[in-house]
Image: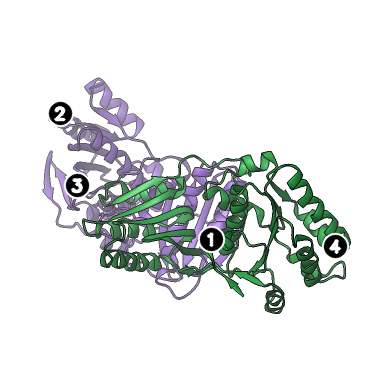
Chain colours: A green, B purple
Amino acid sequence: MMTRAGEDLASPDHACAVPSSDEQLWEMSAEFVGAGLSAREQVTYFDDGTVEAVLERLDDNRVPVADSLQTGQLTVVAAEHTRAALRSPLEAVRETVLDLIDSSIESGWTGFRMTGQFSYGLRRAGGIGLPEYDAALADVLRGRPARLLCFFDRRHYPDEAIGLMRSLHDKEIEAPAIYDDNLLRITSIGPAALRLAGEVDHSNRPRIRRLLETTLDQAQRSHDAPTDITLDLSSLRFLDVAGAVSLVHTAEEFPSTHRLVLTGVRQRVLRVLDRCGAPFAAQLTVEPRPEPREQSRGGAMP
Amino acid sequence: MKIETTRSAQSVRLQHAVGFYRSDTDLLAQLVPLVTAGLERGQPVAVALRPGTEEALYDVLGSPAGLILLTQPDGRDSSSGQTVAARRARELRELSTATGGGPVTVLSEHTSRLDGLDGGFWTELDAAVNIALAELPITLTCLFPELPLHPEILDGARRNHPLLLVGGELRHNPEHRCPRDVLREWPTPTPVLLGPPDRRLSFGAWQLYEVRAAVEQAVLTAGYERPRAEDIVLAVNEVATNAVEHGATAAELCLWTGSDGFVCEVHDGGTLGDPLPGLRAPHPSEPRGRGVWIARQLCDSLHVWADRSGTHVRMRAGR
């Protein structure tokens, strides 16, 4: 059964997702974690090499990550502990998760949710398979104010395992993209509004222009569509010169009734746009990212 | 770093002349009236002269307001004529802008210090100057000795300058050739070979992100500040994009991070349409050609050369 309803997308009780790109994994993880934080739930992320990108995405989404980590509302389980948990006997895992849920409720949070990178379980180091772990967790969650989203991304899981795990989950969450080439992911975030995540270069830059033309076409045909075509660039980590020139030219060719609005623009992308004449394009509005990104995560780029 | 965006139409405004002198006395006798005339017109006069000539000029004129000394090529990147031309264009563009876009008189003198092996530096410099300064309102007079050590210097000078300074007057030079023709006859020199690179990477049009990742890692590891590192990644990306844009074959990136700062080379098997890309400020309506221009602005040096194996670019970017 596929779940697509808005509410459940962000807050399933126990569901799986099969992201086909890293960018999609980060997007869906951040969505799930962010929804928990804003619902006053306590969230635990079991890391195994993915947390930095997920936290960066949460930051892109303007989720107060640092605060959540400080108050303990968001906890990151380090990779070694995630792996240790996946080697533990089922009974111990059940105990641990039960403790986590109980202590969340005792601390006054409205619920508990967990997700992360569990692919280490594929190694069956403890002689127990992922299906058994999954069943044990599902059993603990049942009837409790707790949610679990299991990711089986194609980079970490072979097709066979994905097929099996899919069949064991009642619900699968999907996050459709307009375009995703593993370097750049484009999603629709509203009428005449798109979000770009990743990097724009020679290999995918023509897509943007075509997509903008289509979006403008649709906006012009529809009476109630906004006259601003919005590109959310919060998660755009690189834009090459020809890409920036293309955005500037596209805006200049817009009919006078429409504008191209770039939001959440990072400093790095902003500098390229400035060098390519963006400040001179009348129908282009560039809104920089509100504040500089915190350096607490070592400032590392994924 | 300040990046200028020029939005004016591109027409040649540069007046580029060559004069020849017999002796230092003759040189000064030709220079003084040119400086004085420029100053009397109320224009800034910028000079790039040997220290001795500079001193002699000051002895004659005192220290007149409006006389400006240009940065002289020095050190690591002084053998690349195109790099020196790009820097001079930046300097003169700023000078012209500072005086409301008005005309500037520029005087430059040959110095054997920059001759290199065969004096080819001067031929490359003046060909590159014709491109890089084309749209600036500048009258540039280059003075060469009648008998330099390398005769090629004179051959190049006669081809590169559309105007001749004779008896204090500017005349049409019938021997003048466009930069493309000059560079066909005297190709841009291959720079001195570097040692084995710290990293070598083969890439195609779909692996540009690997190029960016390699460069970013190298400069961050070398302790560059993040914004500077990001600009260098952009510069290399643009050159690397050019290398794979047309060619079907893979290109190669080599990088070094030693005491000279970050140095990298991009090699591809293609041929150059434009022998000196990225020297002319791109016109906004032109979608192409901006990448290498921006790369030149961001790097301390960017030297393009070609040989039988293809096209090569060396970039150096300090902190």
> What is the quadrant of residue B287 in the picture?
bottom left
Badge 3 crowding class, 10 Å Cα cut-off, few under 14, some 14 to 19, many 20 or more, is many
Q: Is residue B197 visible?
A: no
- The percent coordinates of residue A145 (x first, y second) are 71, 55
Tag 1 near tag 3, CB within 8 Å: no
Tag of residue A87:
4
Q: Secondary structure at mark 2?
A: loop
Along the horizontal axis of the image, is A272 left or right of A16? Answer: left
Do marks 2 and 3 share a chain?
yes
Q: CA distance from mark 3 to mark 4?
A: 74 Å
Do marks 2 and 4 share a chain?
no
Q: Secondary structure at mark 3?
A: loop
Q: For this rendering, which residue is in front, B269 or A13?
A: A13
Q: How many marks?
A: 4
Please name which of the two marks, 1 or 3, marks the residue nearer to the observer.
Answer: 1
Do marks 1 and 2 share a chain?
yes
Q: For this rendering, which residue is in front, A210 or A232?
A: A232
Instruction: Determine the chain carrying the residue at label 3.
Output: B
- The percent coordinates of residue A233 (x first, y second) are 44, 54
Badge 4 crowding class, 10 Å Cα cut-off, few under 14, some 14 to 19, many 20 or more, is many
Q: CA distance from mark 2 to mark 4?
A: 83 Å
Tag 2 near tag 3, CB within 8 Å: no
Which residue in the structure is indicated by mark 2?
Answer: B42
Which residue in the structure is indicated by mark 1?
Answer: B211
Q: Is residue B111 above or below residue A282?
A: above
Along the horizontal axis of the image, is A63 left or right of A238? Answer: right
